[in-house]
Amino acid sequence: MRRICLTGGIASGKSTAARLMAELGAHTENADQLAREMTAIPAVRQALTDALGRSFYAADGTLKRAELAAYVFHHPEALKKVNDLIHPRVIAELEARYEKVKDEPGCFVVETALAVETGYVDWFDIAVVVTASRTERLRRLVDRMELTPDQAVARMAAQLPDEAKLERADHVITNDGTYEELEAQVRKLFAEICP
């Protein structure tokens, strides 16, 4: 089973591309979803609280995601601490999941925002980067995620610029157009890399 990294900046459209690949038959995993699941583990919850010097958990143990995001995207050192705690666990889980299916035909697609930043991109056979213009990404963040323009800019600034991701890309999907245009690109690429 071929390992495909599907990465890109926030609001680039990588989740839509991943969903389309799943519909085409790929085995897909979402690193962000796994990271959310990791934050519910008691040992991780305690480690995050210790690292940040305060708790971002509600009384029932659920993570206050909006509060944590607002904090870490304005405190780069806190974001690094969170990433250092969560990403190794996510990577280990993804690799364990791959081991279970690696002898099957097809593609193992991992949707991950931080593959290049963490060096995880090197584990994959193929890296696909989904891009969109800064203007389009800001619009999506404000319209769909209901962020303020300042919050949207802060989240984008906290990620590696697209140019750095593109240097590592084997294939690029440009997502500034319609859903149908994105779907056509994904179908074409999928036929090429997931025979």
Image: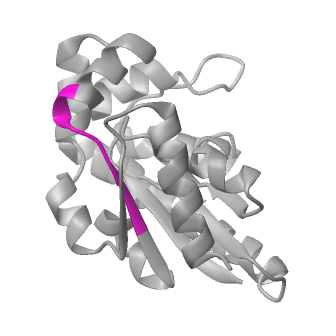
Residue 169 vertical placement versus 52 (above, below): below
- Specify the segment rendered in magenta: 128-135
Identify which residue, 144 or 79, lies in the foreground.
144
Q: Is residue 5 above or below residue 82?
A: below
The answer to whether residue 95 is above or below residue 102 is above
Residue drawn at 47 percent across, 47 percent down: 14
Q: In the image, residue 21 lies at what x, y percent?
A: 65, 56
Q: Which x, y percent locates residue 173?
A: 38, 55
171 lies left or right of 103: left
When asked about the image quadrant of residue 97, the answer is: bottom right
Q: Nearer the viewer, residue 132 or 154?
A: 132
Q: Is residue 89 visible?
A: no
Q: Residue at x 58, y 27 (%)?
A: 63
Name the residue at 80% across, 82% down. 105
Q: Is residue 154 above or below residue 23?
A: above
Foreground: 177 or 104? 177
